Image: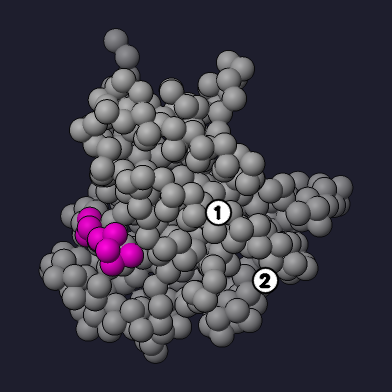
Amino acid sequence: MTIAISKIVQGLEPSATLAMSAKAKELKSHGKTVYDLSIGEPDFVTPQHICDAGTAAMKSGFTKYTLASGIPELKNAIVEKYKNDYTLEYKPSQVVVSNGAKHSLHNIFFTTLNPNDEVIIPAPYWVSYAELVKLSGAIPVILPTEESQNFKMTAKHFEQAITPKTKMLLLCNPSNPTGTVYNNKELIEIAEIVLKKNLFVIADEIYDKLVYGSNRFVSFPTVCSGLQERTIVVNGVSKTYAMTGWRVGWTLSPENIAKKMGELQSQETSNPGSISQYAALAALTGPQDCVAQMLDAFTQRRNYVAKRIAEIDGLTCSEMSGAFYVFFNIKKYLGKTLGGVRIDNSEQFCLELLTQKQVATVMGSAFGCEGYVRASFAAGLDILQEAFDRISEFVNSCH
Ligand code: PMP
Ligand code: GLU
């Protein structure tokens, strides 16, 4: 007799990004060389001055519990960032610092959703959104978008999906997994519906600093007045500062929600790591040239990957305007035999690509979009070159 798993966790899908990355790590542990484009994680080490701030925090004895919702210095730095970068005014009491932005999202859903509330999520969506919404008892309403429209949700489409049960929209901009970036006009059109229908928006802006070429990032609450009270912004240090392992993310929300999320956190996890919070403080307040340098490297890689996809017969992708992923169309190869194995869906494509060619990617189905594959280009050009040579060989083995 074993303890039964709760119904809600029984139905939980594990994170496909972490699962594919675990498969790649397992192969590596058996001595195989793997070209790992599965997980969305900068390959750079955390900049030295940020690591030094972590060490200094340890040496200075900042190794104790902090306020559950984060140290005041970091909350102030987050408030300053939004003032300087986006002319948004927040109070420190509107900030909750958590163990990564994934934890921030969990806090939001648990604090604001009731069973059967509906959350509109444009697809392709980041793997954890729908599962986290379901964990809170609410209902994810998936709104498909088209590659031909750069995977953007139109305002009209959004309005049609709204029902009396709709509570909020979850908008990831720049998008993981597609790299789409919404412009000011598109955001205003969405915002007008949000205001008209009295909805709320979770604006996941974790890739705000990773935008390419002439594309410009616009923070959602800036586009119309009255929106800041209706928006919860999610962000963190994982992507911008190559700090995935430090686990620091945050929310900016109306004060009553922030207070409750802080209380939830005080019962569930207490504060995020004290040392990590001091490192995140150094990231936000220290020199920013490391961000520009990493962006330059990502830009080169993005251009390289776009060229490679265009050269491979049958693969297509929309413009990668932001983040560090390519979401490419593999529909031409579904129902075909690759390396002697019939491929009927994106999961089979990714598993065979890993088995036959040792290239790790993530299936589009995990992002709510069959017929596509996501590859992260947060990897060195040498790795990308070998990985795309192998992807090319894989699809050229088609019969
Ligand atoms: N949102 C998006 C869109 C992401 O891609 C990620 C991936 N890390 C997160 C949130 C969570 O980031 P973290 O928990 O590392 O802060
Ligand atoms: N967000 C990254 C990804 O999409 C990291 C893994 C995760 O948290 O899911 O790959």
Left/right placement of residue 205 relative to residue 84 reads left
Residue position marked by numbered label 2 in the rendering: 77
Secondary structure at numbered mark 1: helix
**Residue at 54% of width from left, 49% of height from top?**
377
Left/right placement of residue 367 relative to residue 59 reads left
Pinpoint residue 202: horizontal percent, then vertical percent. 38, 66
Task: Inspect this view and state whether residue 165 appears.
Answer: yes
Q: Quadrant of residue 77?
A: bottom right
Task: Inspect this view and state whether residue 102 appears.
Answer: no
Q: Quadrant of the N terminus?
A: top left
**Residue at 24% of width from left, 36% of height from top?**
334
Q: Nearer the viewer, residue 35 or 77?
A: 35
Classed neighbour count for the residue bearing mark 1: other residues with Cα under 10 Å, few (<14), some (14–19), many (≥20): some
- Report the magenta residues as a range: 142-150
Left/right placement of residue 48 relative to residue 371 reads right
Above or below residue 335? Residue 246 is below
Mark number, residue 157:
none
Amino acid type, residue under disc 2 in the picture: Ala
Q: Quadrant of residue 141?
A: bottom left
Pinpoint residue 80: horizontal percent, then vertical percent. 65, 77
Q: Is mark 2 within 8 Å of ligand 1?
A: no
Q: Quadrant of the C terminus?
A: top left
Q: Nearer the viewer, residue 55 or 73?
A: 55
**Residue at 64% of width from left, 45% of height from top?**
380
Secondary structure at numbered mark 2: helix
Whether the magenta-drawn stretch holds residue 147 is answered as yes
Residue position marked by numbered label 1 in the rendering: 304
* Of pointers 1 and 2, the one earlier in the residue sequence: 2
Classed neighbour count for the residue bearing mark 2: other residues with Cα under 10 Å, few (<14), some (14–19), many (≥20): some
Pinpoint residue 288: horizontal percent, then vertical percent. 73, 68
